[in-house]
Amino acid sequence: TLTAAIAAHGMPSWIKMDIEGAEIDVIAGSRDVLREGLPHMVIDTSHVVGTHTTAARVEALLQEIGYTVRTEAPGGSQLTWAWRDTAAN
């Protein structure tokens, strides 16, 4: 799990995530540890789960944790960028 990897290796400054639609579950299951460090993230959110891509749900989860987020579609693939809003801290 992401939580186990962070416990074993420490909090990274960046996380790149492309896990074929499992990003919702991974982020939801790692909320507490992510909230502690708020590493920058880029997530492929072009995967369809149900009838929609994961972008909207990933954005909502990350915003709940404390991230500022933006989703773009460069080259047709959706990427969600997440970063700590230093102005709010």
Image (spheres, rainbow, N blue to C red):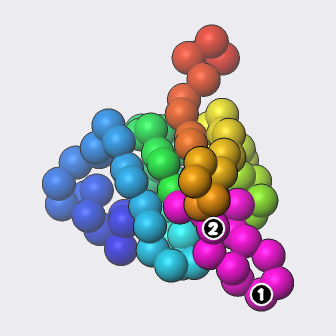
User: Identity of the amino acid at label 1?
Assistant: Gly
Q: Residue furthest bottom?
A: 50
Q: Is residue 88 visible?
A: yes
**Residue found 17% across the figure and 54% down from its top:** 9
Q: Is residue 12 left or right of residue 43?
A: left
Q: Is residue 7 left or right of residue 36?
A: left
Q: Would you place residue 26 above or below residue 33 in this image?
A: below
Within 10 Å of disc 1 (Cα), the crowding (few <14, some 14-19, many 20+) is few
Q: Are marks 2 and 1 in contact (CB under 8 Å)?
A: no
Q: Position of residue 53 (x, y in %)?
A: 72, 71
Q: Tag 1, which secondary structure?
A: loop
Circle 1 sits on which residue? Answer: 50
Circle 2 sits on which residue? Answer: 46
Q: Is residue 76 left or right of residue 35?
A: right
**Residue found 37% across the figure and 50% down from its top:** 15
Q: Tag 2, which secondary structure?
A: loop
Snapshot quadrant of residue 31: bottom right
Point out the image quarter for the C terminus: top right
The stretch drawn in magenta includes residue 59: no
Q: Position of residue 30 (x, y in %)?
A: 49, 62
Point out the image quarter for the N terminus: bottom left
Q: In front here: 13 or 75?
A: 75
Q: Is residue 24 visible?
A: no
Count the labels in the image.
2
Q: Residue furthest right?
A: 51
Separation of marks 2 and 1 at Cα, in angstroms: 12 Å
Report the magenta residues as a range: 44-55
Q: Would you place residue 67 above or below residue 31 in this image?
A: above
**Residue found 66% across the figure and 34% down from its top:** 68
Q: Position of residue 64 (x, y in %)?
A: 72, 47
